[in-house]
Amino acid sequence: MDRRGFLASLIGCSALSIYMLNKANAAIYQNITELNEKFIRENAPDGVYWDALHKHFIFQDDLIMMNNGTVGPMPEPVFNTLVKYFKVQATNPFDCYNYFPKKREEVREKLAKFINAAPDEVVINRNTTEGMNLIASGLDLKEGDEVLISSHEHPAGIHPWKMREKRYGIKVTEVSLGVPPKSVDEIIKSFKNAITPRTKVISISHTVYITGLIAPIKELSDLAHENGIFLLADSAHGIGMLNIDVKTLGIDALASSPYKWLGAPTGCGLLYVRKDVQDIIWPSIASSGWDTHEDASRFETLGQRADPLIFSLGEALDFQNIIGKDRIERRIKTLAGYLKKELQSIPKVRLHTSLNTYLSGGLTAFSISGVDPERIVSFLREKYNIVIRTIGRESDNTQGVRVSTNVYVSFKHIDMLLEGVNHLARRGT
Ligand SMILES: Cc1ncc(COP(=O)(O)O)c(C=O)c1O
């Protein structure tokens, strides 16, 4: 049976065989292991290695997915795992409380290791929005206390604080970010100048959705901690795109959505809460354990969970681990670097993303003077089957489009996109 036939049978067949799903996953990992042996790490910036990897994603009709906002795709083993464990619920629900809880802890350990945290610092929740809200509502802040956010926060990084401002009288102050910022210093100086004796929190996007900036979180953590300030990072796009090490970043808390870049299914999120600050945060949902658990599980008394989603998150971690986090980050940045270099040489194109590889990752935002961003999106979809998205706003001249370059994107795909951009820049439509 070919791959498509196999998948069709998976979806259509009522008697899904767990044996077959396990076998399919084992074959995929065997294939990647062989590729790893054949192509040593530095080798193959494009070509066989990444082409072979692309085959383990199951895109419909050769869709070229260059938007990892909202959700990204699951690679095949993750989808297989999802089906496998939902089948357990359908056929033997007893197992959902028999061995699932233990297996959930195995995923937590894997996830913690992946970001260099301890398992008792890791909350598995639903998404970044939930993580940002938990911290914003859980910190003890008084009327008049101040929170600094950047001018480019996602609504999930604005509204939890705005609600608290309206309800309890804290003050939320926006710090302006350049498009793109010129340097780490420029960003640090802006935040330093905004700090007052009442500043208690800096809450900032690690991965800025509007401009693709990767904020210098380590330097901001240093600044925050020198001033006794709590540092919360919204890294919605971070896990799976960047080789995140929470200890090096030095943050107090970080929220992420593993279904954007990592390949997990929607419905499971990550919240890291540093051990030393767990005592100063109140849970916002309480069931037994909220007041007795002495670790981050206090923030996870969420009732019954969709464990197959969590196990599939574990599978997504396995899939990334076998390729290598450093290799993935390098590939993503190499693709983005090429895209930005070529975009720069097209007249009328303005890049909103930094060329500096410390201040950027896999998100590239740009505009074409005189061309409606909606037109760029529709033209690329109609002509090349490429998916990108509009982004930004008129008020600070960030209106444009955003492109993601995840590992299943090739230089060939980027060349197709560039051909389209060139056409629109010359012809205007
Ligand atoms: C920077 C940033 N923060 C938060 C979110 C919200 O993510 P979620 O809907 O997964 O909670 C997004 C969504 O794309 C985002 O880009």
Image (cartoon, rainbow, N blue to C red):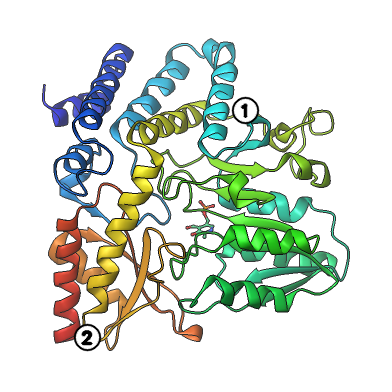
Disc 2 or 1, which lies upstream in sequence?
A: 1
Residue 363 image point, x, y percent: 38, 62
- Residue 273 as seen in the image, left or right of residue 168: left
- Residue 209 as seen in the image, left or right of residue 389: right
**Disc 2 residue type (three-letter):** Pro
Q: Secondary structure at mark 2?
A: loop
* Residue placed under numbered mark 2 in the picture: 347
Q: Residues within 10 Å of mark 2 (few under 14, many from 20)?
A: few
Find the residue positioned furthest to the left.
Answer: 1
* Residue placed under numbered mark 1 in the picture: 304
Residue 163 image point, x, y percent: 73, 64
Q: Residues within 10 Å of mark 1 (few under 14, many from 20)?
A: few
- The answer, for residue 156, to whether it is visible in the render is no
**Disc 1 residue type (three-letter):** Gln
- The answer, for residue 210, to whether it is visible in the render is yes
The residue that appears at 56% across and 24% down in the rendered structure is 104
- Residue 8 as seen in the image, left or right of residue 246: left
Q: Secondary structure at mark 1?
A: loop
Residue 383 image point, x, y percent: 13, 66
The quadrant where residue 24 appears? top left
The residue that appears at 68% across and 43% down in the rendered structure is 273
Q: Which mark is residue 287?
A: none
The residue that appears at 15% across and 64% down in the rendered structure is 415
CA distance for labels 2 and 1 = 55 Å
| Vertical comparison of 304 with 374: above or below | above
- Which residue is at the front of the view, 351 or 138? 351
Residue 421 image point, x, y percent: 20, 75
- Which residue is at the front of the view, 82 or 339? 339
Q: Quadrant of the N terminus?
A: top left
Q: Quadrant of the C terminus?
A: bottom left
- Residue 302 as seen in the image, left or right of residue 108: right
